[in-house]
Amino acid sequence: MNRDIERGGSGELRELGIPFVGSLIYASQKEIATVLADQAVSALIEEVSLTPKPGLVDFKRSNAHKDMDWALLVASARALHDTFYQIALSGYSASLDQSLREKIAKIGRGGEMKMLQATGGVNTHKGAIWVLGLIIAVLAHQMSKAMVRGESVLISLTTLLRNCGQLASFTDRHYQARTLTKGQESRRKYGIRGALEEAQEGFPTLRKVIALPTTAKEGDLYWIERLLQLMSVVEDTCIISRSDLSTLHRVQQTASDILILGITTEVGQQAYQQLCQYCTEAYLSPGGSADLLAAIIFLEKVGVINGTVTF
């Protein structure tokens, strides 16, 4: 489902013209980094363009977010292109060690500054920088290893995510947090897993959801179903930060109920619309699920999905 598309300002869809990673067997390091950055930005734009979404900004509405809209998130995504490009270059030919972990962390913090400059101080994609940055660094690392040997690239999703966990588990000695992150606050208060722990464990939620079947096979319903699958299991600190643990459990259960009804059915779609309304009115935004959805979109775009990709 490589939907390499972007919504124009008037709502039309136009082709982005981004090359598929499968054509990169003889590509240079910079060409590979460019494609990975292109696909990461495109994935973020597809995620925000998915409409409707519960609480999250979509193409038509800001929903639970009063400080951002579709255009702002698109501008934010585009501002991160160089960040993803530099992360890919850093991962290429590097070892999965503390040095790489600290290098991409520094690039990521620079990306956060670019994001804030593009959005006027609004945090739009901090979580996505973390998730996609790790995946891009490890993917570039794995691609370079095979290409140095002159082999076609065979990348296992399981190996990719396991290596992400390995890289995320190194500490960043140069980072000094002034305040606790939402994930750290939630872990301290409720004992749940935040974005750091999710990454350090090799993104178990991503592995679980990607392995699930879907009733919708293409188009927006396919991605909405993926979003619901994520919302049903993600311990979303973005929801908890705006409410409490019982509210998160309610959202998770509602997402599960809709999946049982079937997103392709009329009753399922009605229930989904009700969830969208509830999240907006309750000021709830499943931002953690949105970050992981962007990661799934990215992984589908580059072909690392359903087991392996060869090119």
Image (cartoon, rainbow, N blue to C red):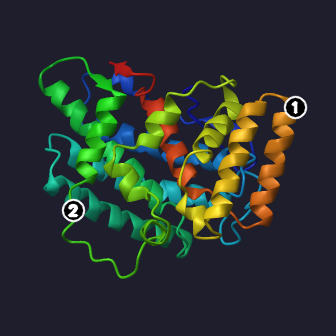
Residue 85 in view in this figure: yes
Please provide percent x and percent y for residue 186: 49, 68
Residue 28 in view in this figure: no
Q: Amino acid at mark 2?
A: Thr
- In the picture, measured across the screen, residue 220 lies left or right of residue 194, that is right
Residue holding disc 1: 266
Q: Quadrant of the N terminus?
A: top right
**Rendered residue at 26%/72% (across/down):** 175
Find residue 232 and report its image quarter: top right
- In the picture, measured across the screen, residue 37 lies left or right of residue 16, that is left
Q: Secondary structure at mark 2?
A: loop
Q: Relative to 282, does residue 250 appear above or below in the rendering? A: above
Q: How far separated are the C-alphas under marks 2 and 1?
A: 48 Å
Residue holding disc 2: 171
**Rendered residue at 40%/28% (across/down):** 304
**Rendered residue at 19%/33% (across/down):** 144
